[in-house]
Amino acid sequence: MGEHQHGAHAGSEPGYFLEMLDLDGVVLADTFSSVTKWIAGHLGDHRASRILDLGSGTGTGTFALLRRFTDAQVTALDASADMLHYLLERARRAGLDGQVVTHQADLDSSRLPAGPFDLTWASASMHHMADPARVLADLRAALAPGGLFAMVEFETFPRFLPHDFGFGTPGLEDRLNAVADRKREEHHPTVNSDWTARLTANGFEVREERTFQTDLRAPLSEAAQRYARVTLSRLREGMGETLSDEDRHTLDALLSEHGPERLETRADLTVRSSRRAWIAAPAG
């Protein structure tokens, strides 16, 4: 359920992008489990034998789905050959390579693989589409009778720090995310769409929509601490000259590897996030 993100500092080394997506799955495993349980409840007696993971990245959604639908075959679709290779290696190590098929495609210029699919899944990927209406039409046509489309988008991106954490001007994370939100909207105009209306306008009936909250409290696991570090590092790199000198100094102190104010020394670090999810079926 993570989206593709780039950064530096803790994330400038090779493999940061992969680590960012993988940590999303590790740290938010309970959230993924809740979402897939919800989907299974809507499927009822309809078996999810064939699943399409749209924008699979490193496989966070793919493996969450396979933990819930243990006999399924998942087609993992992504534009990146490197991502898909990495995903297949993960599947092989987990003994699941026989249940994962990869499909490389950029859906701004390509169509979906042939269905039918019992479940199609898009987590933090629909807002990347240049023409979401066409992709939704393809998804609707790809579903088997009784099949469902499950879609997840960020409602609020992860937050880790209290409003006032003892140094710097309070509200640092709010300011960082306000800038990131503006940049996201510039690059992905549909990111804050009314997806219920879009689904309905493109031939789907929305069965249910829900918000799934993540609220992990201190003390955080090492993986959650690392998640905070690479996420804030990505924000730091993307800010450019938009940060004040004070905010830059404060953030650099938090992201220091050995400084006294580094993130890992904090007893008030949390992981807070919310995601909006929709379950839809072809109308009529």
Image (cartoon, rainbow, N blue to C red):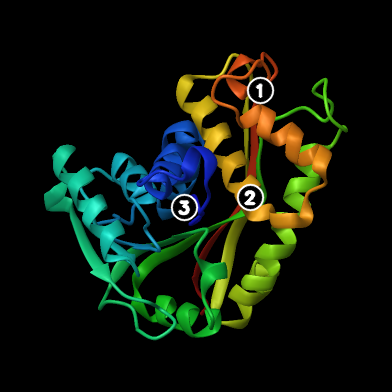
Image x and y of residue 8, in percent: 52, 46
Side (left or right) of 139 relative to 34:
left
Answer whether labels 3 and 1 touch (C-beta < 8 Å).
no
| Crowding near the residue tagged with mark 1, few <14, some 14–19, many ≥20 C-alpha atoms within 10 Å | many
The amino acid type of the residue labelled 1 equals Leu
Image x and y of residue 1, in percent: 48, 50
Image x and y of residue 23, in percent: 44, 37
Q: Residue at x 64, y 47 (%)?
A: 235
| Crowding near the residue tagged with mark 3, few <14, some 14–19, many ≥20 C-alpha atoms within 10 Å | some
> How many labels, in total?
3
Q: Which residue is mark 1?
A: 269
What element does badge 1 sit on? loop
Q: Which of disc 1 and disc 3 is earlier in sequence?
A: 3
Q: Which residue is mark 3?
A: 42
Between circles 2 and 3, the one closer to the viewer is 2
Q: Which of disc 2 and disc 1 is earlier in sequence?
A: 2
Q: Which residue is mark 2?
A: 210
Q: Residue at x 79, y 43 (%)?
A: 174
